[in-house]
Amino acid sequence: MYRKAAGYVAQTRYAAELAVEKNWNKKIRVIGNPVRQIPPSSKQVKENIVLSVGRLVRTKHFDDLVRAFVEIGNPDWKLIIVGGDAQKQMVGKELRTLILSLNAEDSVILEGISIGYR
């Protein structure tokens, strides 16, 4: 498909060289990456976070993740689960109940549509 395209845009010279090497297209332009590196600030507070993002459905086993995280018991870490209840399974409500039963409200946080709490 690249050969039939009107042109090929690469973010780096290296990517452009690969495109030439693979004979993808003859019209190649390199554009700069608009994302700039932000230097670290001494004022930044860093946290140890395990982040899990996904639809809250039973097949993803977020309950097992919560149990494993709590079992590890490292007080310097937080588990943040971001997602929305999907397929009307009410997994968010079940996870809230599980988190409360494990006394993990301070270390396991649910965020997302209609499930967020702190």
Image (cartoon, grey):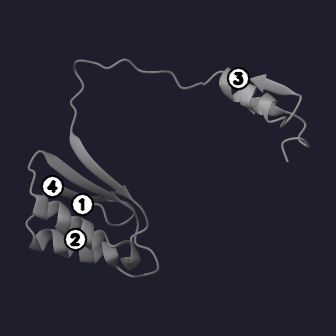
Quote the CA–CA distance across marks 3 and 4: 43 Å
**Disc 4 residue type (three-letter):** Ser
User: Callout 3, which amino acid?
Assistant: Ile
Image: 53 above or below 33: below
- The residue lying at 59 percent from left, 24 percent from top is 34
- Percent of width and height locating residue 13: 69, 21
Q: Which marked residue is nearer to the observer: mark 4 or mark 1?
A: 4
Report which residue position mark 2 lands on: 96
**Amino acid type at image mark 1:** Tyr
63 over 23 or under it: above or below? below
Quote the CA–CA distance across marks 2 and 4. Answer: 12 Å
Q: Do callouts 2 and 4 mark residues in contact (Cβ within 8 Å)?
A: no
Q: Residue at x 89, y 29 (%)?
A: 26
Which of these two is toward me, 39 or 19?
Answer: 19
89 to 22, vertically: above or below: below
Upstream in the sequence, badge 2 or badge 3? 3
Which quadrant of the figure has residue 14? top right
**How many angstroms separate mark 4 from mark 1 (CA)?**
12 Å
List the residue tagged with mark 1.
117
Report crowding for label 3: few under 14, some 14 to 19, many 20 or more residues within 10 A (C-alpha): few
Please tell me which residue is depicted at 39% across the width and 62% down the height of the picture: 83
Evaluate if marks 4 and 1 touch, with contact meaning CB atoms under 8 Å apart. Answer: no
Q: Is residue 42 above or below residue 75?
A: above
Instruction: Say left or right for 56 vs 106.
Output: right
Counting residues from the start of the chain, the first of labels 1 and 3 encountered is 3
Q: Residues within 10 Å of mark 2 (few under 14, many from 20)?
A: many
Residue type at the position of mark 2: Arg
Dot in front, 3 or 4? 3
Separation of marks 2 and 3 at Cα, in angstroms: 46 Å
Could you classify mark 1 by the number of other residues whose Cα lies within 10 Å: few (under 14), some (14-19), or many (20 or more)? few
Name the residue beneath numbered marker 3: 31
